[in-house]
Amino acid sequence: MVKTRILRVVELLADGATRRTLEEAALHLRMCLEYVVLISFTSHRSVWEAADRELAKADADAARKKLRRLNPSYWSQPVRMADGVLEDLEEGYLTESEWGRAFGTVSELLHAQNPFAMHDVEKSFASLAEIAQKLLNLTDAFMITLADSGLAFLCHVNYDRAQAAPKVLIMLGQDKWPETFTLAVSMARAKSDGSAD
């Protein structure tokens, strides 16, 4: 769902910067930003509901603090495979500390605009494009620890912008992540290229 929304934003922004395009892109990104922080709470209904309530009523910084109390490891850690080793992505993705600013940027575009104020459409366009790219990088392959379980999982989302829906691979066994991840990524790429059945 998150990746599909982000890819929709990429399509919208490719069509150019109009007020309507920016609003639709901002709406999709706002939903993505909410889902990104809620993903680690999916295994526990009452914790999800508590996290969702905090997100709805608090400002971004207060919400992050409350989410961290519910699950200190709620933020996804993007990873990549390099020379057969799974390693943390170092840059180019949306960080926990950038989340509040991104949330504010997209939220601002969803409010009625003062018709007498000057609006910098190109600046808004550039901001949304940057947020979308950083969200893509955050959600390509990541590790997350579920709330109240200590269970961590690795998720790889294989997508091709021409396909309707991204394909998701989730793995739970830490001891086999590097080999399994490499194999899974290779198979997914081969399948999306049409070179495998």
Image (spheres, grey):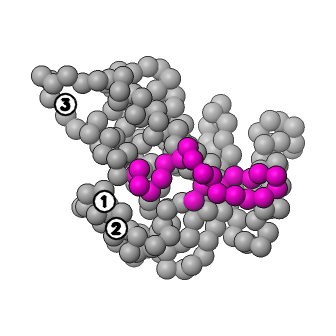
Residue 173 placed where, x, y %?
A: 73, 72
Residue 64 placed where, x, y %?
A: 36, 63
Image-based side of 64 in relation to 156, left or right:
left
Mark 1, residue position: 61
Image-based side of 85 in relation to 165, left or right:
right
Label 2 – label 1 distance at C-alpha: 6 Å
Q: From this viewpoint, is residue 143 visible?
A: yes
* Disc on the earlier residue, 3 or 2: 2
The structure residue drawn at horizontal position 24% and vertical position 61%, both measured from the top left corner, is 57
Mark carried by residue 65 = 2
Classify mark 3: residues with Cα within 10 Å, few (<14), some (14-19) or many (20+).
few
Q: Mark 2–mark 1 contact, CB under 8 Å? A: yes
The structure residue drawn at horizontal position 47% and vertical position 20%, both measured from the top left corner, is 15
Residue 161 placed where, x, y %?
A: 63, 33
Mark 3, residue position: 113
Is residue 83 located in the magenta-colored stretch of the structure?
yes
Is residue 73 located in the magenta-colored stretch of the structure?
no
* Disc on the earlier residue, 1 or 3: 1
Which contiguous range is marked in magenta? 77-99
Residue 151 placed where, x, y %?
A: 60, 76
Q: Secondary structure at mark 2?
A: helix
Q: Is residue 100 above or below residue 107?
A: below
Classify mark 2: residues with Cα within 10 Å, few (<14), some (14-19) or many (20+).
some
Q: Amino acid at mark 1?
A: Asp
